[in-house]
């Protein structure tokens, strides 16, 4: 796992975050239970690679895994469409943890702490060389042992350099 201690965070103040890593967070009245972080991706024209989308989940919280344990739970999901000559593949979600929580009779599949989602990217042979911003949406529903907060979607801007 790469060292991402200084990676941009989507929950940081937009003024203090490089444009390449900005997202649309909820108002900063309280710390967010889930922060979305991205890493820069290097692609050769006509080549493939993967974007790393990191969820940092606050202690005491979890998000539902993908797939979720039940159709009534909101699964964590990364969505993106082709843009600027870059085509996304199907996201690879990490293995889930199984937890018995206070509000559920059966154990649930969740992510806690840190979850790494890998989004395959392919650059067209004709893609413009240089720096691009690839936009993806990350949908999460933070929960603790007693309740779930409303689902939210974070717009993540992934810096991609095509050579």
Image: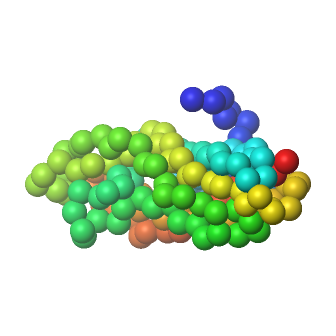
Q: Is residue 102 left or right of residue 88?
A: left
Query: Which image quadrant: the N terminus?
Result: top right
> Which residue, as the protein is rendered here, is positioned at the far right?
130
Q: How many marks?
A: 0
Side of 36 relative to 59 (left or right): right
Residue ID at (85%, 48%): 163
Instruction: Tell me the residue at 76%/68% (across/down).
Output: 84
Where 6 sits versus 163, above or below?
Answer: above
The x and y percentages for residue 76 are 42, 59
Q: Is residue 21 above or below residue 84?
A: above
Q: How is the image coloured?
A: rainbow
Task: Describe residue 102's horizontal placement relative to residue 44 as left or right.
Answer: left
Q: Is residue 159 visible?
A: no
State the image coordinates of residue 44 (x, y, percent, origin top left). 78, 47
Residue 47 appears in the picture as rendered: yes
The image quadrant that residue 67 belongs to is bottom left
Residue depicted at 75% across the width and 47% down the height: 43
Q: Nearer the viewer, residue 93 or 68?
A: 93
Front position in the image: 39 or 31: 39
Q: Give the image location of residue 9, x and y in percent.
A: 68, 49
Q: Residue at horizontal 38%, vertical 45%?
A: 111
Rendering coords of residue 40 (x, y %) = 74, 46
Q: Quadrant of residue 24?
A: bottom right
Q: Quadrant of residue 95?
A: top left
- Residue 6 against residue 58 in the figure, above or below: above
């Amino acid at each position: 796992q790469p060292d991402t201690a200084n990676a941009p965070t989507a929950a940081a103040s937009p003024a203090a975050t490089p444009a390449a890593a900005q997202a649309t967070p909820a108002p900063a009245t309280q710390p967010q239970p889930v922060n979305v972080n991205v890493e820069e991706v290097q692609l050769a024209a006509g080549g493939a690679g993967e974007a790393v989308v990191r969820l940092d989940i606050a202690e005491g919280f979890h998000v539902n895994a993908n797939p979720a344990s039940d159709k009534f739970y909101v699964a964590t999901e990364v969505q993106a469409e082709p843009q600027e000559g870059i085509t996304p593949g199907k996201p690879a979600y990490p293995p889930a943890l199984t937890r018995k929580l206070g509000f559920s009779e059966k154990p649930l599949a969740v992510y806690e702490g840190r979850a790494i989602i890998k989004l395959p990217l392919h650059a067209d042979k004709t893609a413009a060389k240089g720096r691009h911003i690839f936009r993806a949406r990350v949908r999460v529903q933070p929960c603790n042992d007693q309740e779930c907060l409303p689902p939210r979607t974070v717009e993540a801007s992934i810096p991609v350099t095509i050579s």
